[in-house]
Amino acid sequence: MTTTSIPAPRSPRVRTTRRTTRGNAELYGWIFMRVSGVVLVVLIFGHLFTNLIAGQGIKAVDFGFVAGKWASPLWQVWDLLMLWLAMIHGSNGVRTIINDYAERDHTRLVLKVVLVAAFLITVVLGTLVIFTFDPCPAGSPTDLLPSFCSA
């Protein structure tokens, strides 16, 4: 009778060029992911409730609705917190995935640089849109502007 043996699994990869002591940074990242996840759930459900349930539903969400909402500093800060927390939370998760699955140090570095660039571009542009949004731009046709612009 012939017996076949199953080969032993590959030994884990050992990195000799990098130190593995990271201090408490990973612990703080882990705690941040849990706390920001809970805060994001509250922010997102508050956003959905305001936009879809408390108002007139999805049909009422248009340029005028967003313009009226962003006229209030409360909703500017609410959406800013949602943007920043979602981007930091998501980027930290993708960073963890890159650390786990990118095998070569150069590949890991390139992916992290691309991740940081995408994070910065999105956060900067999103923040600029929230705080520089003009609901009543000069020279626009009045039939395209929200009703509160004509006053």
Image (cartoon, rainbow, N blue to C red):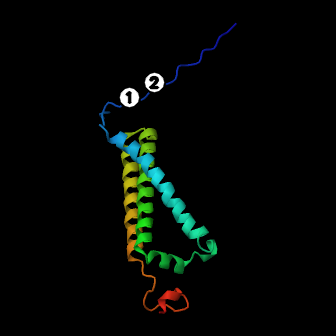
* Residue in the image at 45% along x and 86% along y: 136
Vertical relation: 128 (above or below) 37:
below
Vertical relation: 145 (above or below) 28:
below
Which class describes the residues within 10 Å of circle 2: few (<14), some (14-19), or many (20+)?
Answer: few
The disc label shown at residue 11, or none = 2
Q: Quadrant of residue 120?
A: bottom left
The three-letter amino acid code for the residue at tag 2 is: Ser
Instruction: Return the residue nearer the eye: 94 or 40.
Output: 40
Instruction: Return the residue nearer the eye: 54 or 63.
Output: 54
Residue 22 visible at all: yes
* Residue in the image at 51% along x and 55% along y: 41
Return the residue found at the far front: 54
Determine whether the residue tagged by mark 1 lies in a helix, strand or loop. Answer: loop
* Residue in the image at 49% along x and 87% along y: 148
The disc label shown at residue 121, or none = none
Where residue 117 appears, x then y in whole percent? 37, 58
The disc label shown at residue 14, or none = 1
Where residue 127 appears, x then y in whole percent? 39, 68
Residue 107 visible at all: no
Instruction: Return the residue nearer the eye: 5 or 149.
Output: 149
Determine whether the residue tagged by mark 2 lies in a helix, strand or loop. Answer: loop
Task: Determine contact: label 2, label 1, CB under 8 Å.
Answer: yes
Q: Quadrant of residue 80?
A: bottom left
Q: Quadrant of the N terminus?
A: top right
* Residue in the image at 47% along x and 56% along y: 40
Where residue 111 appears, x then y in whole percent? 41, 49
Instruction: Return the residue nearer the eye: 69 or 124.
Output: 69
The three-letter amino acid code for the residue at tag 1 is: Val
Mark 2 to mark 1: distance in Å? 9 Å
